[in-house]
Amino acid sequence: IINNDDYTNLLEERKEHIGRNLSISYQQKLKIVRGALQYLYDDKGNTFVDCVNNPSHVGHCHPVVVKAMQKQIATLNTNSRYLHNNIIDYAKRLTATLPPSLSVCYFTNSGSEANDLAVRIARHFTKQKDIIVLDHAYHGTSTVAMEMSPYKFDSKGGFGQMPWIHKAMNPDLYRGPYKYNDREAGKKYAADVQRIIEELKKENKAPAVFICETLLGVGGQIPLPPNYLKEVYKHVRAAGGVCIADEVQVGFGRVGDAFWGFELQNVVPDIVVMGKPIGNGHPLAAVVITNEIADAFNNGLEYFNTFGGNPVSMAAGLAVLDVIQHEEMQQHAKETGEYLMDGLRKLMNKHPLISEVRGHGLFIGAEMVKDRNTLEPALPEIDIVVEKVKTKGYLLSTDGPLHNVLKIKPPLPFNKQNADELLQYLDESLSEL
Ligand code: PMP
């Protein structure tokens, strides 16, 4: 039974005063009033385990992050045109997690803004305009980021594909033409990027940018095929283009085996874009570039960002890195993620609706299909399961171009006991269908 009566006023006032194309999660709406690590609490005193909120990376209201920000905001918050230790300390700490070539930081306030800036920098460096993106990708909500996001421009109300944007095939080993059993799949998907480069060549053009996530989030929680980025980056660089890794969802240890998603592919991008987890929910994002690209971008036109790199944001960023390190969260993400994926794979035997489990660390997707041969998406079953699991206190979400992938990317304190309960509730909910 859906009963949102308690929230009638809030819903109506929201409709009146808040942009109307902003959706609200779940059929039975939630009014969340408090958060602590992997837990969220509603106004009725119910506790929920948050399985999707990856910006709250080290946990909602983690006390170390809260204290660091409180201390700094009570001391000073201003723009970055004064000398201050925080911005330098943070840039040094952040770049120490990256390969040595990635050494210069720009700080912004959202992933969209960071992607927008990354593209501007790359276009300036290459003196080219064209951009290669992956089909179904999402890179943000600014005008340029939307142009790079087939997920937006191809959907209802979208403005279509700009002539300088080129979509390469989503390297999906489950649904795409080249599958898990094809050892050359990475190369074959990469050839689609080369195809675009060849087409540009015929028009005397070259790509300014190739941009993709290092595990595809909105594209369907998809790990990249082995050697994919290695091959793509080779093609793009041979054509003079810049390779941007969008780590907005993936980075900061979530994937367990590495701190950055690109490391899983043994490549070094020219530009890395970071967001969401970087400030544990505080609006902070970054573009990290090579020295050579940084010198070229310093062409006399100032780049100034009022809030980017302010001392409070930098204190948040520093505290997040401290917590990841002190609480060994990358290793925890690896162990918990593997444990949960093992459990989900066991569920596949009992429930044919779950047809594939994939991911790295605590970045996990589970495909739900009606039929394992036709791969017809399990709609509306997936939404029913998400609502049922929610009534048991676990908040899940869905993703992917067909809206049939269960998305699991919780705050990293999510533990094995949470995993056991989630598996039990998924089992029960699937059995009740
Ligand atoms: N890149 C990716 C991969 C994202 O998932 C998002 C947000 N969902 C963005 C960029 C944009 O980040 P923001 O919402 O902070 O602008």
Image (cartoon, grey):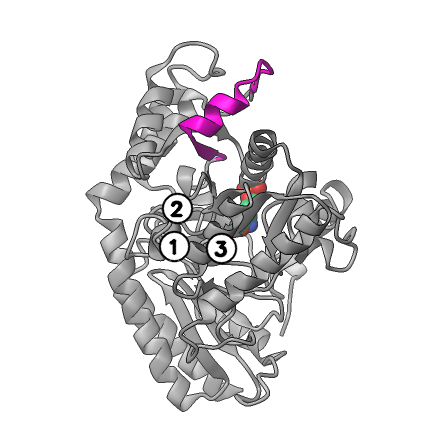
Label 2 residue SS: loop
Which residue: 39% across, 10% down? 83
* Distance (Cα) linking label 2 and label 1: 7 Å
- Is 89 rendered above or below residue 78? below
Query: Could you tell me if the residues under marks 2 and 1 are in contact, i.e. CB atoms within 8 Å?
Result: yes
* Residue assigned mark 3: 232
**From the Cβ of disc 3, is ligand 1 less than 8 Å away?**
no
Query: Which of the image's four quarters has the N terminus?
Result: bottom right
Residue density around tag 1, few if under 14, some if 14–19, many if 20 or more, within 10 Å: many
Dividing the picture into quarters, in which one does residue 326 lie?
top left
Question: For the view shown, which residue lies furthest in the top direction?
Answer: 82
Mark 1–mark 3 distance (CA, rounded to whole Å):
40 Å
Identify the residue at image location x=24%, y=56%: 332
Depicted 366 relative to depicted 112: above or below: below
- 17 vs 78: above or below: below
Kindly identify the amino acid type of the residue bearing the numbered disc 1. Tyr
Left-right relation of 203 to 121:
right
Which mark, residue 60? 2
Q: Could you tell me the amino acid type at mark 2?
A: His
> Residue at the spot x=31%, y=23% of the render?
89
Question: Could you tell me residue 59's position as x and y percent?
Answer: 35, 48
Q: What residue appears at the point 44 percent right and 61 percent down from the top-left corner?
A: 228
| Most foreground residue, 404 or 272 | 272
Q: Give the magenta range.
A: 283-304
**Is the CB–ligand 1 distance for label 2 below 8 Å?**
no
- Residue 7 visible? The answer is no
Near mark 3 (Cα within 10 A), the count class, few <14, some 14-19 or many ≥20, is: many
Q: Is residue 300 magenta?
A: yes
